[in-house]
Image: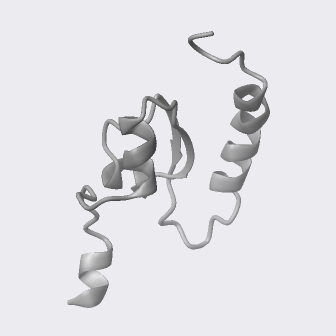
Amino acid sequence: MDARSNFESSAIEEDNLIEQLVSNNKTVVFMGDDTWGKLFPSHFKREYPFPSFNVKDLHTVDDGVLAHLHPEVTRPLEGI
């Protein structure tokens, strides 16, 4: 039962850092494991999810994050 429930991710409804940032009008950008999109639906201003359940693929998530990281951190701040 426990192993099966790990694959059935659903939205996190308890208090958490992501929710606090969003509720305080902070821009939250996500890049990484696609499970996070299911845990925090509609929380990210922009998101770059990558598939993560292929245990033989050790590079897709890392390569995807590296491809988007520099453009995001050098992007002009919004609302200024």
| Quadrant in the rendering for residue 57 | bottom right
Name which residue lies at 50% across and 53% down.
51
| Residue at the extreme bottom of the image, as rendered | 1
Which of 22 and 75 lies nearest the eye of the viewer? Answer: 22
Q: Nearer the viewer, residue 29 or 38?
A: 29
Quadrant location, the C terminus: top right
Residue 30 horizontal/vertical position (percent): 54, 42
In this view, 13 is above or below 53: above
> Who is closer to the viewer here, 46 or 78?
78
User: Looking at the image, what colour scheme do you see?
Assistant: one colour
Dividing the picture into quarters, in which one does residue 8 lie?
A: bottom left
Q: Is residue 68 left or right of residue 4?
A: right
Write the residue at 66% across / 18% down: 77
| Residue that protrudes farthest toward the top in the picture | 80
Residue at the limit of the structure toward the front, as seen here: 24
Residue 45 locus on image (x, y percent)? 46, 28
Image height check: is 58 above or below 75?
below
Residue drawn at 32 percent across, 36 percent down? 42
Which residue is located at x 72 percent, y 20 percent? 75
Q: Quadrant of the N terminus?
A: bottom left
* Number of numbered discs: 0
Residue 64: horizontal and vertical position, in percent?
Answer: 67, 44
- 8 over 80 or under it: above or below: below
Q: Tell me if 12 is positioned left or right of 65 in this view.
A: left
Left or right: residue 18 compared with residue 38: right
**Figure check: 64 above or below 77:** below
